[in-house]
Image (spheres, rainbow, N blue to C red):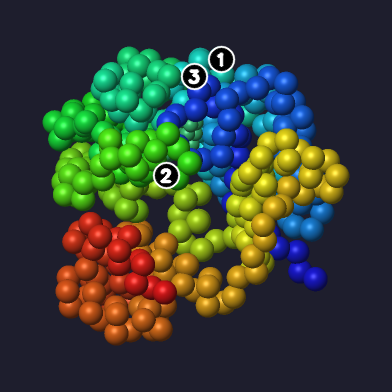
Amino acid sequence: MIQPEIRHLYVHIPFCPKVCPYCSFYKEASDRNKTRRFLDSVLRELDARTVDAKIAPQTIFFGGGTPSALSTSQLEYLLGGLRERLDLGRLEEWTLEMNPATVSLEKASVLKDLGVNRISMGVQSWDEELLKVLGRVHSGAQARRSFEILREAGFQNLNLDLIFSVPGQTRVQWEQSIATTLELGPEHISAYCLTYEEDTAFFDRFRSGEFRQEEERDAEMFEVTMDRLGAGGYAQYEISNYARPGFESLHNLGYWQGAEYLGLGPSAFSRVGGRRWENVPDTVGYCDRVESGGFGEGTVEELSGETLHRERVMFGLRTRRGVVRGDLEPWRDLADRFEADGFFEGDPERIWLTRRGRMVADALAAEFV
Ligand SMILES: C[S@@+](CC[C@H](N)C(=O)[O-])C[C@H]1O[C@@H](n2cnc3c(N)ncnc32)[C@H](O)[C@@H]1O
Ligand code: SF4
């Protein structure tokens, strides 16, 4: 049997300094008693995976939760353990997500020395009032200081996450948040429209009618985002992601272009050899499973060629490069209609979304069933 070669590795760190009321990622408040067992389980799961697959990553992404909620020595232990086990000869991008409240010069310098070359920091907003609405643990001033610390530590590839359409947010406040971000000049900006995710405190307030989803406001904020970030020199290479030339996230491009990836840690997804699985979304359950059998797998799905094709089209269309025309063959009439209606445009080889198409990307994607 030919061993699959894995080029993209994701590691999920499920701890946060404090849980935000809008967020549905699998996470829990940091708990010192669980951490060491969790770190050992991740390394053990990696050992079990390397028996059947060759892992020589081009990209590694530590996400969460909040990887920077780990202490400097815990990060040294985990990242050092990974370095010992992996062939890093092909590594181009190693990203780690940080919350501004958990950044220090010592931690940032250690991460840099261990090989991390890209930091993604969740800022969400620079406005103190909106940061309170979002239940964030940091102020705008602290986020700015953390950004400066990351620069001081030598990081030359920084992403900042922002959220728009926060309850009570005005267009002027959003423009101001974008202006402050542009002033700092990160290499990459992710700008997400707030979504009301089930099983969050925000969802309950949405269901009770206190918070409302307003399509017109969302569209206006999205247009402002595209205009301002475009004018600031950032190309929108995916619906919610903007980068200076040469700073697109290779890890995320891998996902969107249908590459295979391996995920370690609770709730992490993997897709290898036509199988997709999700590790159990529970830290203790995950550790139990890894300790007894080496793997954290919970649910598994066998993917047909048709499903893989459809997913490649749906994700590909969200990117600036779009998809090759041949991939749209099963939906030819639909694609022709979207092109005639001004949602799609292309050249003889590829098709991608117009600005008008990007405004309604989710609704268009839903048609590819
Ligand atoms: C794992 S967090 C980033 C790192 C760190 N945990 C933090 O929050 O600072 C991933 C990002 O997803 C975005 N996000 C989370 N929940 C969201 C929601 N309900 N709507 C829109 N964006 C959301 C936020 O921008 C957040 O920074
Ligand atoms: S947004 Fe980040 S810090 Fe907040 S709960 Fe989600 S993962 Fe944790």
User: In this figure, what is the number of numbered marks?
Assistant: 3
User: Which-is-in-front pick, marks 1 and 3?
Assistant: 3
Quarter of the rendering occupied by the C terminus: bottom left
Residue designated by label 2: 197
Q: Image height check: is 148 above or below 186?
A: above
Which amino acid does the dot numbered 3 rest on?
Answer: Val
Q: Residue at x 35, y 28 (%)?
A: 134
User: Is 271 placed left or right of 365 in the picture?
Assistant: right
Residue, disc 3? 103
Say which residue label 1 marks. Answer: 106
Question: Residue 51 vs residue 27: left or right?
Answer: right
Q: Quadrant of the N terminus?
A: bottom right
Please, what secondary structure does the residue beneath circle 2 have? Answer: loop
**Few, some or many residues within 10 Å of mark 3 (<14, 14–19, 20+):** many
Tell me which label, 2 or 3, sits earlier in the chain.
Answer: 3
Whole-percent x, y for residue 74 in the image: 68, 23
10 Å neighbourhood of mark 2: few (<14), some, or many (≥20)? some
- Residue 37 rendering spot, x and y as whole percentages: 77, 29
Q: Label 2 near label 1: C-beta < 8 Å?
A: no
